[in-house]
Amino acid sequence: WYIWARAWFETGLVSQTGAWCLSVVDSENKFIAGMAIEKSERARNKALVLFLMGDGAGGSRVVKSIEFSPTLWVKDNPYSLEGKDQNRNMFDLRKQGDKVTYFWYGGYHSFFESRIKDKQASKVQFFVGQYKGGNSTINQLVTHHYLNDFSFYKLNVPFWRDVPNRYPTGAELFIDATGEVNPEEKGRLYVNNLLAPDDEILGTDYFKVPPGKTKVQLLVSSFAEVESARAEIEEAWI
């Protein structure tokens, strides 16, 4: 299965605390995998992103934790107002057999657990809450901690050939030829605004569009067809 979502986790005051947790469970409500964001400190504006993995028996463990500052600036926090406004507050989570891949700030982190290899997702649970001793007032609860968008896809569905679709319906591909997203990494491929290094072919040199008319041929599988295509070209002056 595959999850794509947008998050917003941002404090209004340093002393605020709170947490959210996204969990995928099986038909017996046993945890498979998930992700959490927690802020328990009142003296520092620091929070943790936690990548969670199940043990096949209902328990879970943290396979990786990342500390960040939940400010409104995207340089500190991709799940901020600025990140949201710049369309950079998305993340994804993918399970393929015993492998679970998590996303954080342009990079992917994969971990393996043989005990969840054959576990099937039944439900997705999302928790938002406060720590014991705190309350939901403006002064104490994290100002923004929720999901803006959420999509869940089941991979490896039974067809003539059991091959997962590379891109789900409505997926958007973007080649950052000019370094708009990251000036230091021009020519990178993004899928739904997430860097997609596995989809890049080493040595690819993307074509440029000269003045006048340019014909581009789109090649698809024999069972598919292209209903329409659109190209956006921005004129640049140097």
Image (spheres, rainbow, N blue to C red):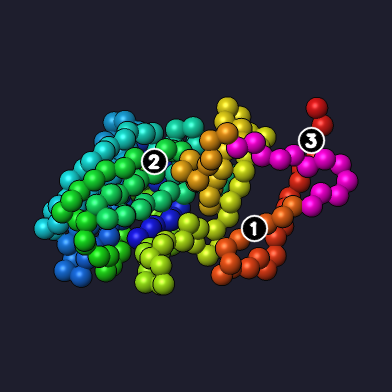
Query: Dot 3: what SS?
Result: loop
Q: The N terminus is located in which quarter?
A: bottom left
Q: Disc 2 marks which amino acid?
A: Tyr
Gap between marks 1 and 3 measured at Cα: 29 Å
Q: Residue at x 43, y 48 (%)?
A: 91
Query: Dot 2: what SS?
Result: strand
Query: Circle 2 is placed at which residue position?
Result: 108
Tag 3: Cα neighbours inside 10 Å, few (<14), some, or many (≥20)? few
Gap between marks 3 and 2 measured at Cα: 33 Å
Query: Dot 1: what SS?
Result: loop
Q: Nearer the viewer, residue 85 or 209?
A: 209
Residue 61: x and y, percent? 17, 46
Query: Circle 1 is placed at which residue position?
Result: 219
Q: The C terminus is located in which quarter?
A: top right
In magenta, the rendered stretch is 204-215
Q: Residue at x 22, y 56 (%)?
A: 117
Q: Nearer the viewer, residue 116 or 218?
A: 218
Q: Is residue 182 left or right of residue 72?
A: right
Q: Disc 3 marks which amino acid?
A: Ala
Q: Earlier in the sequence, mark 1 or mark 3?
A: 1
Q: Earlier in the sequence, mark 2 or mark 1?
A: 2
Q: Earlier in the sequence, mark 3 or mark 2?
A: 2
Q: Residue at x 53, y 35 (%)?
A: 202
